[in-house]
Image (tube, rainbow, N blue to C red):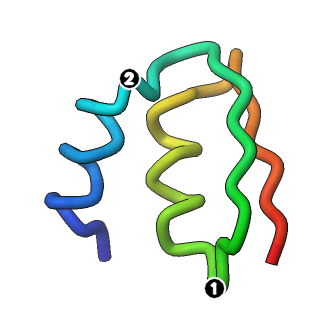
């Protein structure tokens, strides 16, 4: 289940295709999943609990 508010927030923050993102304090990874969608296959996400 995707949170549309979170998606819009990350898009407005400038997260986009091809970026390499560090997600600190990711918890269960719900936001990490949204970030993964935004950066696509050419980007990456490193998540730290």
Q: Residue at x 38, y 23 (%)?
A: 14
- Which of the marked residues, 1 or 2, is nearer the chain's N terminus? 2
Measuring from the top left, give residue 43's x and y in whole percent. 70, 23
Q: Residue at x 58, y 44 (%)?
A: 36
As drawn, is 38 to the left or to the right of 23? Answer: left
Residue assigned mark 2: 14
Q: Residue at x 73, y 26 (%)?
A: 20
As drawn, is 10 to the left or to the right of 37? Answer: left
Q: Residues within 10 Å of mark 2 (few under 14, many from 20)?
A: few
Q: Residue at x 59, y 59 (%)?
A: 32
Measuring from the top left, give residue 27's x and y in whole percent. 66, 84
Measuring from the top left, give residue 11's x and y in whole percent. 29, 32
Secondary structure of the residue carrying tag 1 is loop
Q: Is residue 24 above or below residue 13?
A: below
Secondary structure of the residue carrying tag 2 is loop
Query: Which residue ends up furthest to the bottom in the rendered image?
Result: 28
Measuring from the top left, give residue 47's x and y in whole percent. 79, 60
Q: Nearer the viewer, residue 13 or 16?
A: 13
Label 1 and label 2: CA atoms lie apart by 23 Å
Q: Is residue 31 above or below residue 49?
A: above
Q: Residues within 10 Å of mark 1 (few under 14, many from 20)?
A: few
Q: Which mark is residue 28?
A: 1
Q: Quadrant of the C terminus?
A: bottom right
As drawn, is 15 to the left or to the right of 24? Answer: left
């Amino acid at each position: 289940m995707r949170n549309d508010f979170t998606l819009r927030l990350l898009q407005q923050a400038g997260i986009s295709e091809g970026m390499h993102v560090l997600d600190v304090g990711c918890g269960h990874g719900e936001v990490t999943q949204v970030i993964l969608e935004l950066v696509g296959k050419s980007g990456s996400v490193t998540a730290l609990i």
